[in-house]
């Protein structure tokens, strides 16, 4: 059993109990980590506070990652509350619904900008803010998907954003390695989250994945959480700049 007692983890991207961020938070808490969990805005506050009742001593903070002033205010709060942090989980992605339908060639300029700002640049902004608080080194992780490498119809601009996200992981890993901060991505198989429901044909993605994956099923969100605990622990101190697949082997298949 991995023991993260004495370490502080900050989790971004909690929307509801189906969120990958929630599964990760549960696993980190079970491993003994002290948790700070963020929600985007007042509309999501109530659900976040309700969920945190299941995680004794976890605290909730508001932060819209598309606003630099909110990021700065949050990390000032975190420094005051915890002094230092050890793990940051970036489970944030968004693209306008109309750009996740039809053909990628029809992606709007604004939709492209929003997808990359929220889903990619936010990792840069959070890593920059977190690094000064990672006094003992640390682990930063984000969530990606196989649509970054291969065409997944209807995933559209989000696939392009995930490709940019994975490149961002590598560049951040290079910059932050000198501070003993590791940066990695977990490439999870399709999971029924609030964000996934916005993707046209998501049910087809689930069926195809289960049929073709070597394990013959879809990934459980708890398995993604377990991988996050591993990346937060000292068992992964030699790993940085990597994309770790948690998809029941789907990515190894040619057809």
Image (cartoon, rainbow, N blue to C red):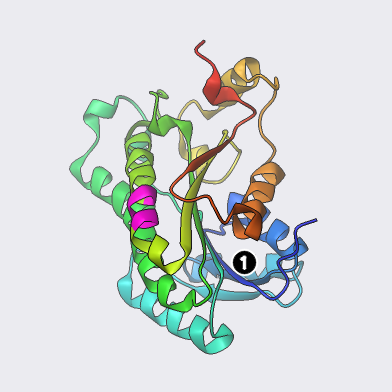
199 within the magenta span: no
Instruction: Give the percent coordinates (x, y) of residue 240.
Output: 47, 51
Taking depth in this image into account, of 113 and 77 the one nearest to the observer is 77
Identify the magenta region: 169-174
Quadrant assignment, res 219: top right
**Where 35 sits versus 191, above or below?**
below
Please name the residue that numbered disc 1 is placed on: 48
Instruction: Give the percent coordinates (x, y) of residue 114.
Output: 29, 51
Question: Which quadrant: the N terminus?
Answer: bottom right
Instruction: Give the percent coordinates (x, y) of residue 207.
Output: 61, 20
The number of numbered discs placed on residues in the rendered structure image is 1
Left or right of 242 on screen, residue 46:
right
- In the displayed orientation, state which residue is furthest to the top: 255
- In the displayed orientation, state which residue is furthest to the bottom: 80
Residue for point 33% across, 60% down: 175
Mark 1 is surrounded, within 10 Å at the Cα level, by few (under 14), some (14 to 19) or many (20 or more) other residues, namely many
Instruction: Give the percent coordinates (x, y) of residue 8.
Output: 61, 73
Residue for point 76% across, 74% down: 56
Secondary structure, mark 1, is: helix
Taking depth in this image into account, of 15 and 142 the one nearest to the observer is 142
**Where 110 sits versus 174, above or below?**
above
């Amino acid at each position: 059993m991995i023991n993260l007692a004495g370490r502080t983890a900050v989790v971004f991207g909690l929307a509801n109990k189906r969120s990958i961020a929630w599964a990760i938070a549960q696993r980190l808490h079970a491993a003994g980590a002290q948790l700070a969990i963020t929600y985007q805005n007042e509309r999501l506050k109530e659900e976040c506070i309700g969920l945190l009742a299941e995680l004794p001593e976890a605290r909730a903070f508001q932060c819209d990652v598309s606003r630099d002033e909110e990021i700065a205010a949050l990390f000032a709060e975190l420094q005051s509350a915890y002094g230092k942090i050890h793990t940051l989980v970036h489970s944030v992605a968004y693209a306008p619904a109309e750009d996740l339908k039809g053909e990628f060639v029809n992606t709007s300029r604004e939709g492209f900008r929003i997808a990359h700002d929220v889903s990619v640049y936010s990792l840069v902004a959070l890593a920059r803010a977190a690094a000064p608080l990672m006094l003992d080194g640390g682990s930063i992780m984000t969530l990606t998907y196989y649509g970054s490498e291969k065409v997944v119809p209807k995933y559209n601009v989000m696939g392009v954003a995930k490709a940019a996200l994975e490149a961002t992981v590598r560049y951040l890993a290079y910059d932050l390695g000198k501070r003993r901060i590791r940066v990695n991505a977990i490439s999870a198989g399709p999971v029924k989250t609030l964000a996934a429901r916005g993707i046209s044909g998501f049910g087809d993605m689930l069926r195809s994945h289960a049929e073709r994956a070597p394990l013959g099923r879809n990934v459980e969100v708890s398995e993604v959480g377990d991988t996050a605990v591993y990346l937060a622990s000292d068992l992964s101190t030699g790993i940085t700049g990597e994309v770790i697949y948690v998809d029941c082997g789907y990515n190894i298949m040619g057809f």
